[in-house]
Structure formats: structure tokens, C-alpha cells
Amino acid sequence: EAPAEATATPEATEVVATPEPTQATPEPTPAVEMPVVDNQQAVQDYGWYCSSCHGLNGEGSPTTINSALVGMPIDKAALLTEFTTLPPFGAMVVHPYRAGIPELDDARLIALFDYVAVLAGTSETTVPAEEAPVAEATPAVESTPEASADAQPIDLAKAQADYGWYCSSCHGLNGEGSPTAFNSNLIGMTIDTEAFVTKLTTLPAFGEMVVHPYRGGIPEMDDEQIRNLMGYVVQLAAGQ
């Protein structure tokens, strides 16, 4: 009989484990300190009537062209004339008469423009750096246990900016509410973060009446951005 052919046994190939790529976690951007001013009515008026276009700190809005105030020369007399002069019928205006708020009298408008000039950094009323009180950086906060079972730290600077653009005109600069928005005071309110995220990210049924539109009316806000914003809302509601 012919000898059986030997079957070659392939040599074992050594498998080298490829390390998983690591992704650096970016550090949260520190929150921007608010300027120090004496007129708190002006600060509130800015939050209610200006920040949705011009940003919480005058940095502008990504949805409004040429809306940044920082570095802009502010002619307060010209602004007062613009805001207190009824435009001709059919005229295109950037700012409506008295910002569309009839109760904004001249004194409140002048104080508001003073604050706008402070944000722009082109006003003599800006508090010098050496005289301004040094505020400690606000640490990242977690939602309350009632708000979320999986509380996450928030990016405070991003949340503040989003709040200024999308929420403050109804809920106030610091959650104190607005005189023109019913039940808009956030302070002391219990916020269920995940329930609110679900509400904002779920398309309502046709014809359903909603307090907040789908994704706050801002389609480009993704789930994490909304959840981060809600973490800041929880902080305001807690009076922090």
C-alpha cells in the first residue's frame, strides 16, 4: 500500500490585539461671568427682550445675522430715537417700535441701552476689571435625583448660551419669569429632566396644543444639547 500523504498543519498565526482608540473628553468651557451693573431692571429687560437675538452676554445668536454686540460701537441717543419713533407705514425695521413692548418707557429704554453698551464693551459705565468683584467659577452641576436617574454634569457655558437664545425671553435671565408669559417663573419648580427631554424630542400629534414646540423650535438642537440645557434649567429652578 502507498503510504498516506502527510497533511501539512498550518502554523498558528499570532493575533495581535489592536488597542481601542481612545477619545479625549473635552473639558467643559467655563461659564462667562455676567457684567456688574446697578440697574437690575435693565438686566431683566435685556433677558426678556434682547437675548434671544443678541445672546446672554451680547455674543450674538447663530440664527440671527450680525447680532453680536461685543465690540460694537453703541450710539445710545440714536438707538433711543430709533426705538421711540413710529416708522412709516410699510417701512422695514430691524427693531420694532419700543421693541414691540409698549410699556418700555424712555427711562427703561435708556437704562437698557446703557446695559447693551456694557455688554458691547464700548461704554464708560463698564466696571473696571480691578474694581469688579471676583466671582468664583460655577462648577458643573448635576440634576436633582427627581430630575433624572442618570444625572450628568453639564457644559455650563453652552447651556447658558442656549438658555439665553431660546428660553430667557419667556423665562427671564435667571429663571424669574416674564410679565408677558403666563406661569413662566422657573424658580422653585420641580423639573423632570428626562420627561422634558422626551417631550421636546417627540413630535406632537397633528393639531395638539403644546407649550414648547418640537425641539424648542430649533431643529438643529440635538438630544444631548437639549439635555444639557435642561440641566441648567434645573439649576435655575433650584435657585443656584
Image (tube, rainbow, N blue to C red):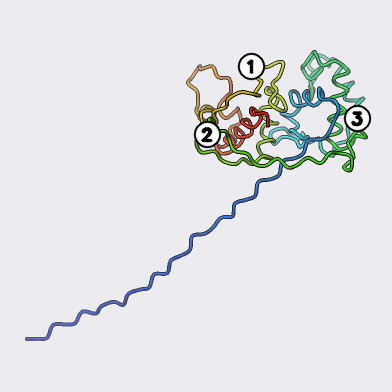
Q: Nearer the viewer, residue 235 or 107?
A: 235
Name the mark nearer the viewer: 1 or 3: 1
Compute the Cα span from label 1 to label 3.
Answer: 36 Å
Dot 3 falls on a residue whose secondary structure is loop
Q: What residue is shown with label 3? A: 75
Q: What residue is shown with label 1? A: 183
Percent coordinates x, y for residue 67 in the rendering: 77, 33
Compute the Cα span from label 1 to label 2.
Answer: 23 Å
Percent coordinates x, y for residue 84 in the rendering: 86, 17
Percent coordinates x, y for residue 137 in the rendering: 73, 42
Left or right, 8 with reference to 68: left
User: Quarter of the image holding residue 123?
Assistant: top right
Q: Nearer the viewer, residue 221 or 190?
A: 190
Compute the Cα span from label 3 to label 2.
Answer: 47 Å
Q: Is residue 80 placed above or below 16 in the rendered structure?
A: above
Mark positioned earlier in the residue sequence (1 or 3): 3
Q: What residue is shown with label 2? A: 148
- Which amino acid is tagged 3? Asp
